[in-house]
Every structure is written in structure tokens, then in C-alpha cells.
Image (cartoon, rainbow, N blue to C red):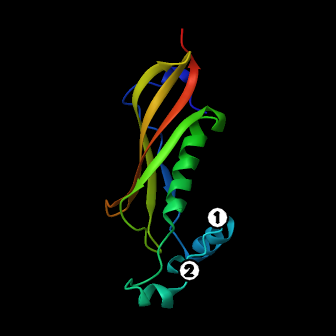
Amino acid sequence: MMRLEQISAGTDLPALDITPITRTTLALFAGASGDHNPIHIDIDFARSAGSDDVFAHGMLSMAYLGRLLTAWFPVESIRTFDVRFGAITPVAARATASGTIAAIEAVDGERRAQLDLAVTLADGTVTLTGHAVVAFGKDE
């Protein structure tokens, strides 16, 4: 977990480098999430829909951001977590999940950090942006 004295506006969380997305990853995520949309697991279906290949579930990228958050803050400290999908994540893509402390505030007796989040492909494409609020101590 992140140490409280390290938290200030402008602090970057250490990035989470994601292993390349494989077809196995997509199949396992489909089973775990219950999202069996064939656009993510059936290349013939994806091609008939106009795509060259299957691509990752948007929620898989959100899950990676969740891993980034919970590597530094306990899950029970997360107050809000939302994302906006911006681009697809193709098979074999190398992505990185990142976060920056945007602001610190006192709310309901807690110190809270507002975080700006993103998942970015190796070519610079931002596939997902997000925002989270985490509590990390008592307001003094």
C-alpha cells in the first residue's frame, strides 16, 4: 500500500505494465466476467462485424486499473471509480495502466485523493480514461 506521506497532488502511481493481451486472456476474462460477446472471442464473428480480429473487453482494461488502484490502496478505501472507453485494445497489444494524484481533499472526516487514471497502448493510444477517489486517512 502507498505510504501516507508519499501522497500529494501531482504524485504518479507506479505504472502497471500489462502483459500482451492474448486470445487466452480474452477467453478467460469472458468466462470470469460472464461477457461472452463473440466480438471478443470469435475471429469469424469479429471479421463479419468489420473488424480485422477480436479485441479486448473494455471491462478488462478497467480491471487492470482496479489492479493498479488496489496495489496502492486497500479496496475498502475506494470511494468512487469510473471510466470512459476511448479506443479498442487489440490482441497482442502491450498496455500500461497509470494514475496520478490530481487533488487531495477533506470529506466527511477523511482525507481523500482524487486520481486521474488511464490505460495506454505502446503506440500512445489511450484506450481508457478514468477517475477514482480513495480515502487514505483521517482529516485532522
Q: Local crowd at mark 2 within 10 Å, few (<14), some, or many (≥20)? A: many
Image quadrant assignment for residue 108: top right
Image quadrant assignment for residue 89: bottom left
Say if 108 sits above or below 64 in the image: above
Q: Which residue is mark 1?
A: 33
Query: Which x, y percent locates residue 36?
Result: 61, 75
Say if 31 sits above or below 67 in the image: below
Q: Local crowd at mark 1 within 10 Å, few (<14), some, or many (≥20)? A: few
Three-letter code for the amino acid on which mark 2 is drawn: Ile
Q: Which residue is mark 2?
A: 41
Q: Residue furthest left?
A: 124
Three-letter code for the amino acid on which mark 1 is drawn: Ser
Say if 110 sits above or below 121 in the image: above
Per the rendering, the mark at residue 63 is none
The quadrant of the picture occupied by the C terminus is top right
Query: Which x, y percent locates residue 61?
Result: 50, 58
Q: Residue furthest front?
A: 108
Identify which residue is drawn at 44% across, 69% down: 93
Residue closer to the observer: 4 or 57: 57
Would residue 95 be found to the left or right of residue 36 on screen? left
